């Protein structure tokens, strides 16, 4: 009964989001048009504007709604680089953790009961290597952000582990998008944010922990 209520509430919020046309405001074009209004709001009530941006960001990520990327740009434009990084980093991680917990609460028992035997090896592997695997997924944006949150909720990864690994692993991406937001007037498309050089840096960041892990294993084998 409780799960049904949670599902209905989530569906209702998502329907309200699209039904009221709020999704139209979370586009790059709309953001650039409203940049002056947002700046005036921040000048008048900086703390209230920061709190509102933080809560909206958390809600968008928790409900897996489109618009987190555009909001990262907006926050960077409004609060500058360091203030934007602080807001986006914590809001995105808290929202991701809420989505993770919702997936675990609503779907995990059903999935594990139905496919438990087939997932035994996966579960054991996630217990051993879950933090490292999640870290790699966060560093290299191969899979959609919201999909990682939902799928990880079906695994045995601890909530605390999910939070701190996500906080660290998403930081490079946060730096990229917030920095782009500080130069919002010169950004014409979302694809223009991730230039080939930036994608290469993501790949190198993702390869580093793997190389370090392999080197550590080799050292342990030699010592043994």
Image: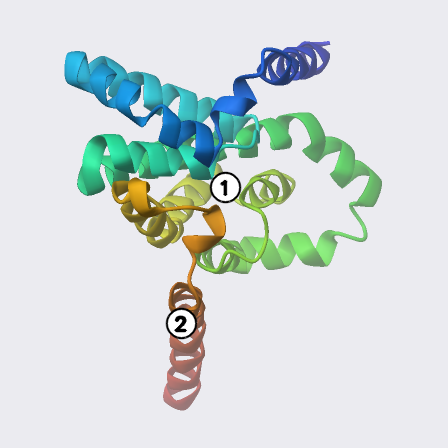
Residue corresponding to mark 1: 158
Q: Quadrant of residue 1?
A: top right
41 lies above or below 180 = above
> On the rendered structure, is 141 left or right of 172?
right
What is the crowding at mark 1: few (fewer than 14 residues within 10 Å), some, or many (at least 20)?
some
Q: Nearer the viewer, residue 33 or 198?
A: 33
Give the residue displayed 61% in from the left and 59% down from the top.
125
Q: Nearer the viewer, mark 1 or mark 2?
A: 2
What is the crowding at mark 2: few (fewer than 14 residues within 10 Å), some, or many (at least 20)?
few
189 lies above or below 104 = below
- Across and down, in percent, residue 3 comes to 69, 16
Q: Nearer the viewer, residue 181 or 151?
A: 181
Q: Nearer the viewer, residue 96 or 178?
A: 178
Q: Secondary structure at mark 1?
A: loop
> On the rendered structure, is 28 left or right of 90?
right
> On the rendered structure, is 130 left or right of 16?
left
- Across and down, in percent, residue 39 comes to 23, 23
Give the residue displayed 50% in from the left and 41% down from the top.
158
Q: Quadrant of the C terminus?
A: bottom left
Which circle's residue, 1 or 2, is located before the other in the chain? 1
165 lies above or below 91 = below
Give the residue displayed 27% in from the left and 45% down from the top.
183
Q: Secondary structure at mark 2?
A: helix
Between the C-alphas of marks 1 and 2, the distance is 27 Å
Q: Quadrant of residue 70?
A: top left
- Across and down, in percent, residue 80 comes to 20, 37
Task: State the mark number for residue 204.
Answer: 2
* Image marks 1 and 2: residues in contact by CB distance under 8 Å: no
Q: Quadrant of residue 111?
A: top right
Give the residue displayed 81% in from the left and 45% down from the top.
115
- Across and down, in percent, residue 20 comes to 59, 11
User: Which residue is outermost to the bottom?
Assistant: 222
């Amino acid at each position: 009964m409780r799960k049904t209520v949670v599902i209905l509430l989530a569906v209702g919020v998502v329907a309200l989001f699209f039904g009221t046309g709020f999704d139209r405001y979370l586009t790059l074009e709309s953001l650039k048009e409203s940049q002056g209004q947002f700046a005036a709001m921040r000048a008048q009530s900086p703390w209230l504007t920061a709190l509102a941006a933080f809560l909206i960001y958390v809600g968008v990520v928790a409900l897996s709604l489109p618009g987190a990327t555009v909001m990262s740009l907006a926050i960077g434009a409004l609060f500058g680089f360091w203030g934007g990084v602080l807001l986006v980093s914590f809001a995105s991680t808290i929202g991701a953790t809420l989505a993770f917990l919702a997936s675990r609460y609503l779907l995990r028992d059903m999935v594990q009961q139905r496919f438990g035997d087939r997932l035994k090896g996966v579960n054991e592997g996630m217990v051993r290597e879950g933090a490292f695997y999640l870290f790699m997924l966060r560093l290299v944006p191969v899979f959609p952000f919201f999909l990682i949150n939902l799928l990880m909720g079906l695994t045995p990864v601890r909530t605390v582990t999910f939070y701190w690994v996500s906080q660290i692993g998403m930081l490079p991406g946060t730096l990229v998008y917030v920095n782009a937001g500080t130069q919002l007037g010169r950004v014409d498309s979302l694809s223009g944010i991730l230039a080939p050089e930036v994608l290469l840096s993501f790949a190198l960041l993702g390869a580093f922990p793997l190389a370090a892990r392999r080197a550590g294993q080799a050292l342990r084998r030699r010592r043994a």
